[in-house]
Image: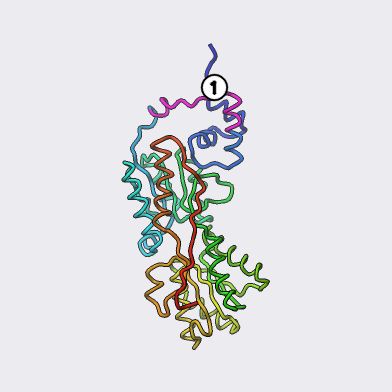
Amino acid sequence: MTEPVTLDQVARAAGVSRSTASRAINGGVASKQAIAAVARAVAELGFVPNRAARTLARQRTDQVAIVAPESPTAIFVDPFIGVVIAAVAHCLWQAGLQPQLALADPADPVASTKRFLHHSNVDGILVVHFHHDSCLEALLGELDLPIAFLGRPPAGVAAPYVDADNVQGGYVATKHLLDQGRRHVASISGSLTRSAAVDRRAGYLRAHREAGVEPGPAIELDFQFGAPGAAAARLLAGDPNIDAIFAQSDSLAAGALQAAAAAGRRVPEDIAVVGYDDSATAVQVFPNLTTVAQPVAALGSAAAGLIADRLRHGRWGEWPRLFPTELVIRQSA
């Protein structure tokens, strides 16, 4: 009788560690190259996962960890994260799953998240608002659990994800300004350790290339805790030719409006401002913000649906999924 192929044999054939082979088979975090190598080894060797043994080794809890590597203050201040978590929780409850919010200790977010994930018996992980310099990808790579992302994961990590089309969002915002005849468009971005900020910046640059216009000055801030008014004031003081600002969030755009007023610049006559998110802030400031709307609740539901499908049906749904953004035109540009 032929002995069944073992996971160790698959790992050796694929040239990866046993834990990497397990993650690649079970939907955890692994590189695209590792996933492809393991898939080839599985096919060549005829490996059949022992799901009965896996069930005995680890009982299902129907709990999903929502990992948001932010300080608790940021989670409760940022309207994007709040809406996302509410949508995620609702979708998981509908699937009969229980969300667990993993709050990170600001003094050591990686260590505190690691303690939570190693000591709470969850069946899967959903990561939202990911910093690519947070060192969390190494931690997530240790875990033999299905993991999905809301937002594009780090380069080289082949994990299921959903995201807004932030490149297109940055493009339409900037193109709107350039189409109005603005020729010196400054940029206030979120931290470029976030894929959303990187993608919005890419759209901003693409619009400039297509228009044959040099990009204006740029400044990078934290989405939640930067000082957007002071940053915009520095931009305007450093370059009086600025005639428009693309701000990557409505709170950053509100700071730009304050700085323009303090500098005696009329909006939109002297300087136009476009924000991002179409949050409540957009209609609470004057003039009301032209901004890019993204379907925040739909993003949260879709991300939760990915992990729910994996846990309930043993398969990942369609990914990646990019949701369209839309320019909402108001008085600021």
Q: Secondary structure at mark 1?
A: loop
Query: Residue at 54% of width from left, 79% of height from top?
Result: 234
- Viewer can see residue 226: no
- Name the main secondary structure of what is drawn in magenta: helix
Q: Residue at x 58, y 80 (%)?
A: 242
Viewer-nearest residue: 3 or 110? 3
> Where in the figure is residue 324, as x and y percent of width and height?
49, 58
Left or right, 313 with reference to 196: left
Query: Mark 1 Cα within 10 Å, few/some/many (few <14, many 20+)?
Result: some
Residue furthest to the bottom? 264
Image point (59%, 47%), residue name = 156
Question: Residue 74, image x and y in percent?
Answer: 39, 62
Q: Position of residue 227 (x, y in %)?
A: 46, 74
Magenta span contains residue 44: yes
Residue 210 percent across, percent down from the top left: 65, 67
**Quadrant of residue 145 within the rendered picture:** top left
Q: Is residue 42 above or below residue 103?
A: above
The total number of labels drawn is 1
In the rendered view, tell whether residue 53 sits above or below residue 218: above
Identify the amino acid type marked 1: Val
- Residue 114 in view (yes/no): yes
- The magenta span reads 39-55
Mark 1 lies on residue: 5
Which residue is depicted at the point 58% across and 67% down?
204
- State the colouring used for the structure image: rainbow
**Is residue 270 a member of the stretch shown in magenta?**
no
* Nearer to us in this view, 59 or 246: 246
Q: Is 66 on the left or on the right of 191, as rendered?
A: left
In the rendered view, tell whether residue 234 sits above or below residue 140: below
**Residue at the top extreme, as displayed:** 1
